[in-house]
């Protein structure tokens, strides 16, 4: 199978052309429900109801599961939509004053069982639908943005996070915890040192005992060289939005994709993104010695991604 390739077409149809169990990992961010109109026929995100949107995404990810290796992982970035958006004509963006939504009237005005101003709950609706479709739902990672887009709201907190769901095809799967491990806090290291020489469960290692390696070791009074320096990654990731000057308004930061790839794809493996956009996932995969396959419906975005990172045209 060709690697480092950009397939221009519908995600579901393009996935059907790929061999079973041919990719190691998927990192993707599908178009959010009713938030933007990309001006392309057949685009996902413009369905009349949230239910139809969820159903269509479940179908795409069902085909993705066929293409994913038995130990593969899916890292799915998704955010919510508010009901009753109404006329968008008066909404301006300080960076894009001419508008970046591509819509004046929101589709999210008639969500069933939702009142105007309600959050629709798209992320968890999708996650639970995928779990019901056979995926293992392993983690809800919060992508915290210290530099979120400003919101002109006065009756609720401004949003500064999105979800990244970790889903897997099988009960056992590839996951490199050490690749995304975090430094232990200075106070934790201090506690290790303070317990040196105590007895009981905090006793120092037996002389001649091999050093304990890895993450999350018991809090024993180790010698300085034996104190662990890393802890297991937490499920809140602070990663700022990254500026991107291309014509794609919804590109997520490369650091977010890199973190998912490091944990979920072995070196030399293949990362797939069925909603490739401007090619951020491919850019991250390439920088980490992985291969990529990108699928994108919008031909202008395919050209944009190709100019940004290279890759063959298919």
Image (cartoon, helix red, strand yellow):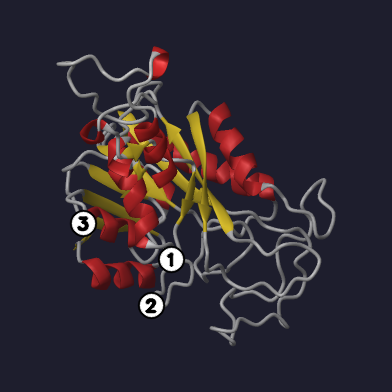
Residue 262 higher or lower than 199, as above or below: below
Mark 2 crowd level (few <14, some 14–19, many ≥20, 10 Å Cα): few
Query: Quick one: SS at disc 2?
Result: loop
| Location of mark 2 (residue) | 246
The percent coordinates of residue 313 (x first, y second) are 22, 62
Q: Is residue 64 visible?
A: no
Q: Residue at x 43, y 65 (%)?
A: 251
Disc 1 and disc 2: Cα gap in Å?
A: 9 Å
Mark 1 crowd level (few <14, some 14–19, many ≥20, 10 Å Cα): some
The percent coordinates of residue 59 (x first, y second) are 50, 39
| Location of mark 1 (residue) | 251
Residue 128 higher or lower than 306, as above or below: above
Quarter of the image containing the N terminus?
top left
Q: Residue at x 26, y 71 (%)?
A: 308
Mark 1 or 2, nearer chain start: 2
Q: Is residue 52 visible?
A: yes
Residue 226 higher or lower than 118, as above or below: above
Q: Are marks 1 and 2 in contact (CB under 8 Å)?
A: yes
| Location of mark 3 (residue) | 286
Which of the labelled discs sits on residue 61, or is there none?
none
The percent coordinates of residue 36 (x first, y second) are 58, 67
């Amino acid at each position: 199978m060709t690697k480092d390739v950009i397939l221009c077409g519908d995600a579901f149809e393009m996935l059907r052309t790929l061999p079973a169990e041919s990719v190691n990992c998927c990192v993707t961010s599908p178009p959010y429900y009713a938030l933007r109109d990309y001006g392309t026929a057949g685009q996902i995100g413009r369905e009349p109801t949230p239910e139809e949107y969820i159903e269509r995404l479940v179908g795409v990810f069902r085909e993705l599961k066929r293409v994913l290796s038995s130990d593969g992982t899916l890292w799915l970035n998704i955010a919510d939509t508010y009901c009753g958006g109404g006329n968008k004509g008066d909404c301006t963006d300080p960076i894009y004053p001419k508008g970046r939504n591509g819509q004046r009237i929101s589709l999210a005005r008639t969500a069933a069982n939702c009142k105007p101003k309600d959050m629709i709950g798209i992320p968890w609706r999708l996650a639970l639908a995928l779990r019901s479709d056979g995926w293992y739902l392993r983690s809800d990672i919060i992508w915290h943005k210290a530099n979120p887009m400003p919101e002109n709201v006065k009756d609720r907190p401004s949003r500064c996070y999105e979800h990244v769901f970790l889903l897997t095809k099988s009960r056992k799967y590839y996951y490199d915890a050490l690749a995304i491990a975090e430094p232990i806090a200075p106070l934790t290291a201090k506690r290790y040192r303070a317990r040196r020489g105590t007895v009981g469960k905090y006793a120092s290692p037996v002389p001649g005992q091999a050093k304990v390696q890895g993450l999350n070791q018991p809090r024993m009074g180790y010698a300085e060289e034996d104190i662990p320096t890393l802890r297991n990654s937490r499920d809140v990731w602070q990663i700022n939005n990254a500026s991107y000057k291309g014509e794609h308004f919804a590109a997520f930061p490369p650091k977010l994709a890199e973190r998912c790839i490091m944990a979920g794809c072995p070196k030399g493996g293949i990362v797939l993104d069925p909603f490739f956009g401007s090619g951020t996932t491919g850019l991250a995969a390439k920088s980490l010695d992985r291969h990529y396959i990108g699928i994108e419906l919008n031909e202008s975005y395919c050209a944009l991604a190709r100019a940004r990172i290279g890759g063959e045209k298919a």
